[in-house]
Image (cartoon, rainbow, N blue to C red):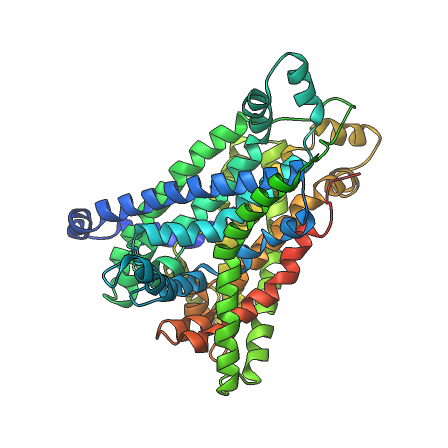
Amino acid sequence: MALGVAGVICAPLMYIVYLALSADSSVWSRLWNTRIPELLFNTVSLAVSVSAGTFVLGVSLAWLVVRYNFLGRQVWEWALVLPLAMPTYVLAYVYTYLLGAGGPVEQAWQIWAGPEGRVFSPHSYAGATLVMTLDTFPFVYLLTRAALLNFNLSYEEVARVCGASRLRRMLTVTLPLLRPAIVAGLSLVILYVVSDFGAVSLLRFQTFTYAVYQQITGRYDQTAAGVLSLLLVLFALIFLVIERWFRERSRFYQTTGRYRVPARKPCGPLGTGLITLYMVVVFGIAFGLPALLLIHWSVSAVAEGAVDVRFLGFMRNSVFLSGLAATFALLIGTPLAYLASRWPSRLNVLCLQAAYAGYVLPGPVGALALLVLFSHLAPFWYGTAVVLIVAYIVHFLPAGLQTMEPALQQVTPNLEEAARSLGLGPVRTFRETTLPLVQGGFVAAWVLMFLQCMKELPATLLLRPVGFDTLAVRVWLEASEEYYKLAAPSALLIVIMTLPALLLLVSKDWRAA
């Protein structure tokens, strides 16, 4: 089964490999001399800077909400997840308005610096880093928070008894034990950054995905797009191999029966004020300010009669596609993650690694590959929503696997072996022993995939059935023409529709009893 799933998921990639390897040598030479060095540098530098920013924000915020007790902590615990509801392309066009020439930020700066004062352009490396960091830091925050909630205080107490200072305990005991969760979050961030299309295209920052889209829509050169896509996939595969090696050296199990949850340290007025200020700033620039602008623009659009009953159809289409795709992806990803975790043979690990290929395949090229495959192999599904759901599964299954794998790795195989020794079969052992212990990770995986599908843009643009628009499509169609007010209602609906799923992540303590 795992081999068959991996084969289906890799089919679009195989088409891209064929397209790139069949390209004439002159195409490779032209791209290497004109585009590849710049694209490689931009993509790698953006991934590095965003991962550094998300590490600082995600880990520090998770540490504060789990280890300290301050006024409003329960509110901030779920509020810090809300930026996940803001699509990168929405955040990009909001900050294009805010930081652009003549925008509110520049006008405010000129009051202090004079009429010649300028702020940095959003259409730059700094602008792309800012937008992508603000949008993706909740990935690291969520996984680090979950790991801290399940952290055993006994380890820190042993280090304290041995004379280790608080800083040394954090650096040598706590962070190493949190390393699998942090690495999983950063891996998800990096894969998200190198495959993102919406933000970099609106900010005009040249990465592999943006260049691929330009080759397809501008030059109509699928061969050059295939070459660039293959290089992007190779870069991602190298990263995944390194990440897999790192994770295999970072497996930790709770082997003692004594489990103690760290008590939250109370904060005084000064500590509460500093923590609250930090969280207000991060939340404000990542979600609060953009949301206020969307509300303001949406109110203006409603007043002008731009919102009608069609938006109910856009909502229904988005939820229907995203829910089906996330559910099928969870069912498909469970055997892949379980087999690689419990029986890490070369075949099982290879099948799991193959499932990650779809996440780094640029959306436009992956969509075109699926169109070709379905038109030849399954023409009766061509032009239907089935093709789009398959594209979602291929592209976003790794988002679920990055969460499902650490959840399975935290459950010691001894528990399953004990259940099997009592006469339970494999299926019943997984259902009654393993699943209750990993349900938190699996719920988080479903939510993450659902959110990604709700915000997906390029594949939806190319694969949606005629007249089957989603909220993301409407946002893009209006924002690409710089009709910010007309794009705001659809963008605001995406945020509203994803809020219940996000709140599910923090509404309950998913730790096993």
Q: Is residue 157 above or below residue 220?
A: above
Q: Is residue 308 above or below residue 330?
A: below
| Residue 469 in view (yes/no) | no
Q: Where's residue 50, x and y in %?
A: 41, 45
Task: Decide which of 376, 153 is in the foreground and name it.
Answer: 153
In the image, taking residue 377 as reference, residue 43 lies left or right, namely left
Q: Residue furthest right?
A: 422
Q: Residue at x 42, y 70 (%)?
A: 476
Q: Does 134 sit above or below residue 267?
A: below
Question: Left or right of 235: which side holds 81?
Answer: right
Q: Can residue 397 be seen? A: yes
Q: Residue at x 31, y 52 (%)?
A: 208
Looking at the picture, does residue 206 appear above or below residue 429? below
Residue under the image location 64 percent in, 48 percent down: 77
- In the picture as drawn, the residue positioned furthest to the bottom comes out as 305
Query: What count of labels does the image hold?
Result: 0
- Quadrant in which residue 274 is drawn: top right
| Residue occupying the point 57% across, 25% down | 170
* Rendered-image quadrant of the C terminus: top right
x and y percent of residue 117 in the render? 26, 58
Asked whether, in this view, residue 480 is left or right of residue 7, the answer is left
| Residue 400: % across, % down | 57, 48
Image spot of residue 219 (x, y percent): 23, 65
> Between 143 and 398, which is closer to the camera in this rendering?
143
